[in-house]
Amino acid sequence: MTDISQKQGAFSWCELMTTDTAAAKDFYSQLFGWAIVDRPMPGMMYHVLNVGDQSVGGLMAMPPEIPSTVPPHWGVYVTVDDVDASVKLVEELGGKIKHPPTDIDSSMRFALIQDPQGALLSIISYKTTAA
């Protein structure tokens, strides 16, 4: 991989979970000039944020399992070489797994972790195919 965002330890994706995706799309496209591309995913619509031809983040409706007391918020993803191995290390280091390792189509795998102080962070690995 040559993309630095897909290297171990790099911040690689930002994502907004919101209660009003239409309003968020309108606000951020006007504020930053982002082109927003709707991408159907199983059970939901995901909105990819683009600067030119580069995808820089996404936004989505707040999942129903998130309590209504949680406000809309931005989250970040840090790249890891292996999500499953990283989840084991999180637990060994005293952290918690808030969402288990899960595939996002066939190209990515992520998990939501919580550090020992309570901060949440998503980790992600990008699957590549040999040329």
Image (cartoon, helix red, strand yellow):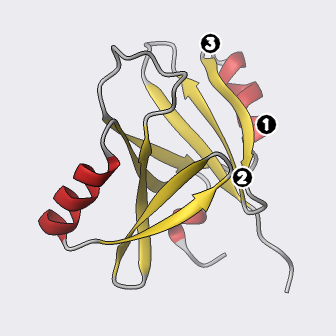
Q: Please name the residue that numbered disc 1 is placed on.
A: 85
In percent of width and height, residue 8 lies at 61, 54
| Label 1: which secondary element | helix
Asked whether residue 9 is in view, the answer is no
Residue shown at 63%/56% (left/top)? Answer: 41
For the residues labelled 2 and 1, the Cα–Cα distance comes to 8 Å
Judge whether 104 appears above or below 65 on screen: below
Q: Please name the residue that numbered disc 3 is placed on.
A: 94
Residue type beneath disc 1: Ala
Judge whether 73 appears above or below 107 on screen: above
Residue type beneath disc 3: Gly
Pick whichever of labels 2 and 3 is earlier in the sequence.
Answer: 2
Judge whether 89 appears above or below 30 on screen: above
Is residue 131 left or right of 6 when viewed as pictured?
A: right
In percent of width and height, residue 7 lies at 60, 61
Is residue 61 left or right of 122 when viewed as pictured?
A: left
